[in-house]
Amino acid sequence: MRTFYRSPDIMVTSDHVAVLQPSPARFRMTELHGAYIVRHGSPSIRPLLEIRARYGSSDVRLFCTTDARTFGQVRRALIRALEQCKPARS
């Protein structure tokens, strides 16, 4: 298992995304689909940035922050982890 990102709030690995705060949850990478970004608020104020995805039949929030740098780091880690878990093409 490879760790792509770890903080007190979230951990992204090749196997799962573990939301550590505020409400702990764990999502298997193979079950996550259709990840997307939601931006709340005005661009002139620090907006709330969210990463959401489909998990089974549910829409789940994987991460949210107002810190653009941290958001970018988590986003890139999630992209790398999702790419790694794609099945190899024959």
Image (cartoon, rainbow, N blue to C red):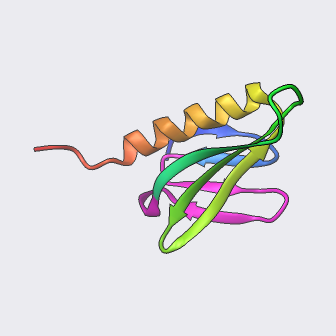
Left or right: where does residue 37 sit relative to residue 29?
right
Segment colored magenta: 13-32
* Residue 43 percent coordinates (x, y): 80, 28
Q: How many marks?
A: 0
Q: In this picture, is 10 found above or below 79?
A: below
Left or right: where does residue 49 sit relative to residue 57?
right
* Residue 42 percent coordinates (x, y): 83, 34
Q: In this picture, is 70 found above or below 65?
A: above
Residue closer to the observer: 71 or 83 = 71
Left or right: where does residue 72 sit relative to residue 89?
right
Residue closer to the observer: 32 or 87 = 32
Q: In this picture, is 66 found above or below 32?
A: above
Residue 30 forms part of the magenta stretch: yes
**Residue found at the far bottom of this picture:** 57
Quarter placement of the C terminus: top left
**Residue found at the far right of this picture:** 45
Residue closer to the observer: 21 or 35 = 35
* Residue 70 percent coordinates (x, y): 75, 31
Residue under the point 82% across and 56% down: 21
Left or right: where does residue 10 sit relative to residue 33?
right
Residue 17 image-quadrant placement: bottom right
Residue 23 forms part of the magenta stretch: yes
Residue under the point 44% across and 45% down: 82
* Residue 67 percent coordinates (x, y): 82, 31
